[in-house]
Image: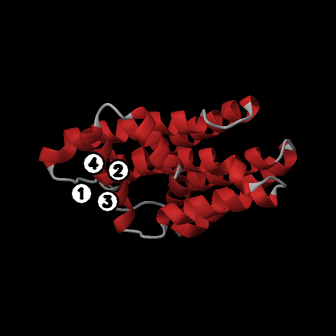
Amino acid sequence: LEIGSLLNTELAGNPEFSEMVAGAMEAQRKGNALEGARWLLLILAACEAAGGDWRDAAPAAAAIELFITAGDLFDDIEDRDIPSSDVPYSANVACALLLLSEKAALRLRDGRQVGAVLHAISGAGTRSCAGQYQDIRYEACESVTEQAWLDMTDLRSGSLVECVCRVGAIVGTDDEERIETYARFGRLLGIGGQI
């Protein structure tokens, strides 16, 4: 609902592009049907477990889903999983998803949470990009050490799931120690999930 509302508000003047963005999100979910739900459930569960009301985390959950979908789309472009004729459109949609992610975070009621959520997303995105860079480089290598692969996985997957849990906890509590605990849990969950 949150994402649909955002698309209707932000892209109201361009229904064709709005449909393209919604279609890209749907296409990204088809390969892994539970992926979006997994992020949604994890962020809402982290919020609730940290002491908050899961309903307050809906804008943050939308921000995370848009952000991770954009990353998945960029990954598909980099892996050449998208026909070359569609790459310009896909890159454009991925950029729009990133910007919509920020708009979703701005819908949080608490200004402190907005800044903390945007900081968490941008930090995770930067680390994930560094991991993706390593992953692309490793494709040309004959062998990669176990530690190098784990470091890359920590950056790519660990940082994203860390962000999901951190953001849920940010909405659920002001306790920085508790937020860091949820973030560490998410990081390890992301690494373990990739393994």
Q: CA distance from mark 2 to mark 3?
A: 9 Å
Report the residue marked by disc 2. Answer: 22
For marks 3 and 4, the one nearer the N-term is: 3
Report the residue marked by disc 3. Answer: 27
Helix, strand or loop at label 4? It is helix
Q: Which mark is residue 81?
A: 1
Q: CA distance from mark 3 to mark 4?
A: 14 Å
Q: Relative to 154, is 107 above or below?
A: above
For marks 4 and 2, the one nearer the N-term is: 2
For marks 3 and 1, the one nearer the N-term is: 3
Give the residue type at disc 2. Answer: Ala
Helix, strand or loop at label 1? It is loop
- Residue 184 visible at all: no
Give the residue type at disc 3. Answer: Ala
The reply to whether discs 4 and 1 touch (Cβ–Cβ < 8 Å) is yes
Between marks 2 and 3 in the image, the one whose residue lies nearer the viewer: 2
Of residue 176 and residue 41, the one placed in the foreground of this image is 41
Q: Residue at x 68, y 30 (%)?
A: 115
Between marks 2 and 1 in the image, the one whose residue lies nearer the viewer: 2
Q: Residue at x 52, y 33 (%)?
A: 103
Helix, strand or loop at label 2? It is helix
- Taking the image as shown, residue 107 lies to the left or right of residue 70, namely right
Query: Which percent across, then down, holds residue 29?
Result: 39, 63
Query: Which percent across, then down, holds residue 134?
Result: 43, 48
Q: Residues within 10 Å of mark 3 (few under 14, many from 20)?
A: some
Of residue 115 and residue 139, the one placed in the foreground of this image is 115
